[in-house]
Amino acid sequence: MASHVVVSTYRSILRELRKSASSERNVVNPLSSSFRSILEGYRQSGNERVLEDVQNAVALMQASRQHQVRLRIVKNFSIFMVLPVPLGQIQSVDRPDGGRENSCYCSASRPRHACDPPVRIDVVTPPGFPPLLLQLDKQGKTNKNLLTRMSLKVGYRYLRMAATSTKVLKCDSASIVFDSVSEQPTITSPDTLASLQIAARHLHDLQPVAFPTETVYGLGALALNSTAASRIFTTKGRPSDNPLIVHVSSFKMLRSIIPSNFTLPATYQILMRHFWPGALTLLFPSDPNVIPPIITANHSTVAIRMPSHPVARALIAITDAPLAAPSANSSGKPSPTRAEHVLRDHDGRLGIILDGGPCDVGVESTVVDGLQSDGNIRVLRPGGVTVEDISRVLRRELDGAECIPQVLVHRRDYADQELEQAPTTPGMKYRHYSPSVPVTLLFTRSPTPVGEQSYSASEYLATLSFKSDLSRPIKVGLLTPTDSVLGTFTLPNGIEWHRFFLGPVSNPAVTAQKLFDGLLTLEEEKVDLILIEEIEEFKEGLAVMNRVRKAAGEFKYLTF
């Protein structure tokens, strides 16, 4: 932006301040100095949003001055401009009269019509600028006494507002140990203990906290408090009919939230003995007097698991309450496997993120329903515990029994339309795991189904350069195993390729660990399209392909 635009904007500010303020220049000077600092910051940073917000502020003052008659009708009408708080961070602001005004998540904007009163705006500024509060009194002029009182509170106000920004607290997983007897962890790192205690207090204030698990990062809130749980839905933008998984830190905590007359099936006892703590979620009968219906989406069952990640389990134990926790991403987006993924998505919307490093498993937990009358195990969502491992454990433990239950995978071994319309567990009804970039799933192993068209790999990849109306080469992200057919393929020129390798074909566990990180990394690199190569649906590959199919908006069958 040319310098003359900045100068013109600053002159407009001075003009409007002088017209709106009293004749005492000492009222105008503090405000004009603040605006000048803002514009100087803009000239250094080049952030166009700053200039736009200042111009909106000028338009706001102009509209206020021009409609004094309308403003007289509204007793004690006031407008607040708060700096430097990013949009969406302010929960409420103190009014000068001692009351409070709730803040909505709105962007700065000019009045829509000449007769409209000014609107509340939040102005985004570079870090380091002091907060500025400007009130127009009912005559549309600045209030000198208010500005004087404001200057006395500016330090406190800035600290309070800064406290609403997202804090990332480091946790050392290696410093946390659970023994076989105690339900409380031993934590040798004072910093880690302090971080967990801060997060626990935040949870008891009914605020959500993001924390690491062995699967993905979770967004946790008190599971037995409907107000706390509701904030998970608002933070994520999650549909209310999508139930949540409850996380516990001990078997004693599990027993405290399920009906006392419920007897654990033999299959559950086996699975819990082998896979708890771990990436396995089980369905239990739910008591609505204990588990709020918002958790279960009004179903008669609740999904529960005991995470194995030391930070997750320690947080639950220190909080001394079960936590409801879906993945810590905006609804429909790829699940985060690193703290920076969560921060990028929720910066300013979350108070605390516990950083325990990257997740080991990389995909969500396996969800199992073993409550049906036939005794079979139904895998509602494949995940970190493989179907093969579940089958192996049950066969070994029940060897010699009259009947060994089958392990049935939803949509592979059976269908349940009613369940899909009203799911009892997350990840079944809605599209998930999709970045903001179009995703195409490339089938390079599977035979082409009847009615589907197949493409030569070289020809299909070359045509991508003609699909863009951009003045630059199209940027294509490519997610493939290191040694797969496409992973070793010579890519055509004319395209800016961004490769992200998912590990060897023979190790689907590594692919699962890297999948979401790859999607989010390529999204951050601002590619125009992401291509994902299929892997064999065996072991962790079943969970990987479950996620990839939901992330992809298009399927293509390639030949080599």
Image (tube, rainbow, N blue to C red):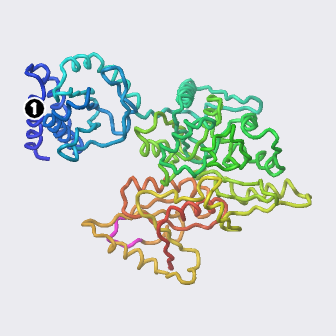
335 lies above or below 324: below
Q: Residue furthest front?
A: 73
Q: Residues within 10 Å of mark 1 (few under 14, many from 20)?
A: some
Q: Amino acid at mark 1?
A: Leu
| Residue lying at 51% horizontally and 54% vertically, measured from the top left | 516
The part of the chain drawn in magenta is 491-496
Q: Main secondary structure of the magenta part?
A: loop
Residue tagged by mark 1? 14
Is residue 129 on the magenta stretch? no
Residue 492, percent from left and from top: 38, 73
2, 179: nearer the viewer: 2
Q: Which quadrant of the structure image shows residue 463?
A: bottom left
Residue at (45% x, 64% y) in the render:
439
| Quadrant of res 484 | bottom right
List x then y, in percent, for residue 442. Answer: 50, 71
Q: Is residue 393 above or below residue 218?
A: below
Q: Position of residue 402 (x, y in %)?
A: 92, 60
Count of numbered badges drawn on the protein: 1
Q: What residue is at 17 percent from the left and 29 percent from the top?
A: 140
- Whether residue 272 sits left or right of residue 278 in the image: it is right
Front residue of this view, candidates 411 and 396? 411
Secondary structure under the numbered disc 1 in the rendered image: helix
Q: Is residue 493 magenta?
A: yes
* Camera-side residue of 229 and 513: 229
